[in-house]
């Protein structure tokens, strides 16, 4: 090949050399890549109803009426078996309403679409149970006496834990002084919750802030460790409030209601 190229003119030789390079680019352009494309997903008011049933139901203790909203937020991502190619990634990379994320960051457990869905639903069920423990523990209520049911089985993942706990607190205790914990606002947020009330980080926060603002939220509760991500594409009119625990979140919402200073990212 080299001996033949030396007998070609320079432009002709370059053209011959470019053929395999162009072929490699063509293959790369349509080869599946280990990324997913995510966008803002649905939000659900945990103080409201889902499919005609209250998201938070309580037995064994009186509950309070609420007019505000506490919206858990989600992202919508392409499935683990969906093929994502280079042209799609380039288009979505520059679209602020979408995000290109490593597949393992969104689907760390791996598996098929069906296995991922089952895993996410299992995580949601565990999150609901833990959120109930955290809320009742915070309120010093005995789970043997107060029974909480959470109706949101069709949304997967653990990231609604904080909002579930806050919904239970608002239903049972409000702001602790006779008012609503939300102050009548639409408050959104995200964060896992542990039984002791510790709030953990989640993924896709920048997309969740967009979903929150789209659905009317003016305040967004974010795990403190993810403030930078939340600020990166922050919609106008949405106030970020960093939290590390359920107690933090309740204290900040109470302070907002009283017009007192509140932590910010």
Image (tube, rainbow, N blue to C red):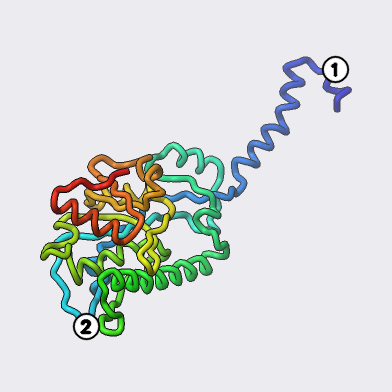
Q: Quadrant of the N terminus?
A: top right
Q: Residue at x 23, y 42 (%)?
A: 237
Return the residue nearer the eye: 32 or 167: 167
How crowded pointer 2 is (Cα within 10 Å; few <14, some 14-19, many 20+) is rated as: few
Kindly identify which residue carries mark 2.
Answer: 60
Q: Residue at x 11, y 65 (%)?
A: 178
Q: Which residue is drawn at 41% across and 55% down?
A: 76
Return the residue nearer the eye: 84 or 134: 134
Q: Where is residue 94 in the image (x, y as percent from the top left)?
A: 44, 37
Kindly identify which residue carries mark 1.
Answer: 7
Marks 2 and 1: which is nearer the front?
2
- Name the residue at the front extreme: 140
Return the residue nearer the eye: 167 or 30: 167
Q: Where is residue 239 in the image (x, y as percent from the top left)?
A: 25, 45
Residue 55 appears in which quarter of the rendering?
Answer: bottom left
Is residue 261 left or right of 96 when viewed as pictured? left
Q: Is mark 1 on a helix, strand or loop?
A: loop
Q: Position of residue 78 (x, y in %)?
A: 47, 55
Residue 180 appears in which quarter of the rendering?
Answer: bottom left
């Amino acid at each position: 090949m080299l001996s033949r190229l030396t007998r070609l003119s320079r432009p002709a030789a370059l053209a011959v050399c470019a053929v395999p390079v162009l072929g490699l680019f063509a293959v790369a352009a349509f080869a599946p890549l280990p990324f997913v494309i995510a966008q803002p997903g649905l939000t659900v008011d945990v103080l409201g109803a889902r499919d005609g049933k209250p998201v938070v139901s309580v037995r064994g203790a009186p509950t309070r009426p609420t007019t505000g909203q506490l919206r858990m937020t989600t992202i919508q991502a392409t499935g683990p078996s969906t093929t994502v190619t280079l042209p799609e990634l380039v288009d979505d990379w520059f679209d602020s309403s979408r995000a290109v994320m490593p597949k393992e960051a969104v689907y760390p457990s791996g598996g098929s679409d069906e296995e991922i869905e089952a895993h996410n639903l299992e995580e949601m069920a565990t999150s609901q149970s833990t959120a109930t423990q955290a809320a009742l523990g915070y309120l010093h209520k005995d789970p043997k006496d107060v029974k909480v049911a959470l109706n949101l089985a069709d949304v997967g993942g653990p990231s609604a834990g904080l909002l579930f706990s806050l919904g239970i607190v608002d239903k049972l205790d409000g702001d602790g002084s006779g008012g609503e914990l939300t102050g009548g606002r639409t408050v959104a947020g995200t964060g896992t919750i542990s039984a002791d009330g510790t709030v953990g980080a989640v993924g896709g926060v920048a997309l969740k802030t967009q979903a929150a603002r789209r659905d009317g939220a003016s305040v967004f509760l974010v795990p403190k460790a993810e403030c930078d991500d939340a600020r990166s594409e922050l919609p106008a009119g949405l106030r970020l409030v960093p939290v590390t625990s359920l107690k933090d979140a309740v204290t900040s919402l109470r302070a907002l209601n009283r017009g007192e200073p509140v932590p910010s990212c």
